[in-house]
Image (cartoon, rainbow, N blue to C red):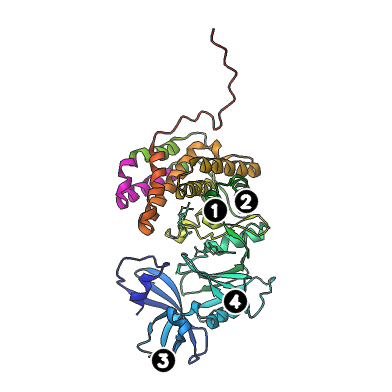
Amino acid sequence: MLRAWLPAQRWFAGKGRDIRTLRLISAAELLPPGSSPGLLHLLLDVDGDCYQLLLGLRTGLPPALAPALIGRAEQGPYAGHAVYEALGDPRLAALLLERLRAPGTLGPLRFDRDPLTLIPAGLQPRPLSGEQTNSSLIFGDAYILKVFRRVGPGVNPDLELPRALAAAGCARVPAPVAWYEAALPGGEPLTLGVLQPYLRGSDDGWQLALRRLGSGADFTAEAHALGRATAEVHSALASALPVLALGPEQTARLAAGMTARLAATVREVPALRPYEAGLRQAFDALAAARGLTVSAQRIHGDLHLGQTLRTADGSWALIDFEGEPARPLADRRRPEPAVRDIAGILRSFDYAARSHRPFAPAWADACRAAFCSGYAATTGRDPREDPVLLRAYETDKAVYEARYESRHRPDWLHVPMAAIRRLAAPAPPHPHPHPRPQPPRRPHP
Ligand SMILES: Nc1ncnc2c1ncn2[C@@H]1O[C@H](COP(=O)(O)OP(=O)(O)O)[C@@H](O)[C@H]1O
Ligand SMILES: O=P(O)(O)O[C@H]1O[C@H](CO)[C@@H](O[C@H]2O[C@H](CO)[C@@H](O)[C@H](O)[C@H]2O)[C@H](O)[C@H]1O
């Protein structure tokens, strides 16, 4: 039953392949055995990846829950029961919130919360629609619970970083109010879900940018403010968590990692092949750069306009600190240059401009410049002052995007490919990041 259902889920990483091995890691009943409906929490090993499932069990399924049906239990105490996606059932979703309100353990599961926040009882749940990496439920328009789907040992950065930011007094990120984990023998706990305030009435940065483009409106004031917000989050993360100064050898290792990622992506996305040598130049330049001061710190890790919310009061918030979903958790928790996030947003302006007909390059350029100025206004350093670093990270991001689009949205592949063509062309000389004012030319005699 699960073998057929899992590959059809957006959050399932092994899409397009037949499941070879499926093994139960843990099972916990969140309601007393025999309850109807029943609620079962499962961790499953599917071909080496661990997934979290919340299954509802009922003898008969009401019509409203028909879309949530997975199949019928064939054996065990629930034999013959309908098995369905519990997050689609308001009764069971409400129960999950009750568990989060009352800290404690249940089998391998541990529920925890911020002792200073009182989460009200009885908030009505509704699932968040749309395509997500995980599954989210909104409770009474006051809180949002993200249920992680592919999980692994170690704290998820989407819990770790927002908590660290909240403790550092940074209000740009909704602070987790409750969370739950699984403690399995012989390993670090796995983060399974995080509840945080729901920013009601906020606008998704990507949708907002597209609307502005569609009406020919300027977005530079927002881009500037977003640069400031990103810089504030980076500064708070740098003050709360370790920062490492990278020497030339470590910077060269970063460049080598980018080159290796490029080579692997070229094997997967043949359209990149003609540009490989050109793209590599950006990484070679980073490896060869001397006198570059690079520091590494905890960052967002997958920043793009879709991870930003413009709140009802007009300020920017950042969400989804999970990092790139396909990367191993240990990699995603490693300190990295903050320019990686900056490159992500700069690429996003290009994505937005290219989704618009006709392509609006001037709009993207203006937003990119405004974002960098906003960033500089807060940190005192403009990312454009490190063109070699910025180019390498933008190139790395465009390569990542080419792989992401070829895997998940082939119709979008042309967007990163346009950037790939631009980035593969020889870099313009960068004696100074900003053109210095030239003395007036003498009139020709
Ligand atoms: N705190 C929040 N307030 C309002 N909306 C949110 C909040 N967190 C997430 N969302 C909405 O939920 C969507 C999915 O959240 P996200 O963290 O990106 O999940 P996923 O990891 O599943 O992609 C976001 O695009 C945003 O629209
Ligand atoms: O939000 P996720 O963590 O799931 O991020 C993944 O999916 C994103 C697309 O939804 C993808 O972002 C790319 O497309 C965006 C437009 O849809 C664009 O704004 C981004 O700049 C571009 O990178 C992201 O790369 C991927 O990790």
Mark 1 crowd level (few <14, some 14–19, many ≥20, 10 Å Cα): some
Q: Where is residue 1 shown, x and y percent of the image?
A: 34, 80
Asked whether residue 264 is drawn in magenta, I would say yes
User: What residue sits right under mark 3 in the picture?
Assistant: 77
- Asked which secondary structure carries label 2, the reply is helix
211, 33: nearer the viewer: 211
User: Could you tell me what secondary structure mostly forms the magenta stretch?
Assistant: helix
Q: Which of marks 2 and 3 is nearer the N terminus?
A: 3
What's the magenta region?
253-276
Q: Is residue 368 left or right of residue 58?
A: right
Q: Gap between marks 1 and 3, in whole Å? A: 53 Å
Mark sitting on residue 100 = 4
- Asked which secondary structure carries label 1, the reply is helix
Mark sitting on residue 229 = 2
Q: Gap between marks 1 and 4, in whole Å? A: 37 Å
Q: Where is residue 436 shown, x and y percent of the image?
A: 58, 26
Check the picture and name the quadrant holding the C terminus.
top right
Q: Where is residue 120 shown, x and y percent of the image?
A: 67, 77
- Asked which secondary structure carries label 3, the reply is loop
What residue is at 34 percent from the left and 42 percent from the top?
Answer: 276
Q: Identify the amino acid type marked 4.
A: Leu
User: What residue sits right under mark 1 in the picture?
Assistant: 211
Q: Earlier in the sequence, mark 1 or mark 3?
A: 3
The verdict on label 2 being within 8 Å of ligand 1 is no
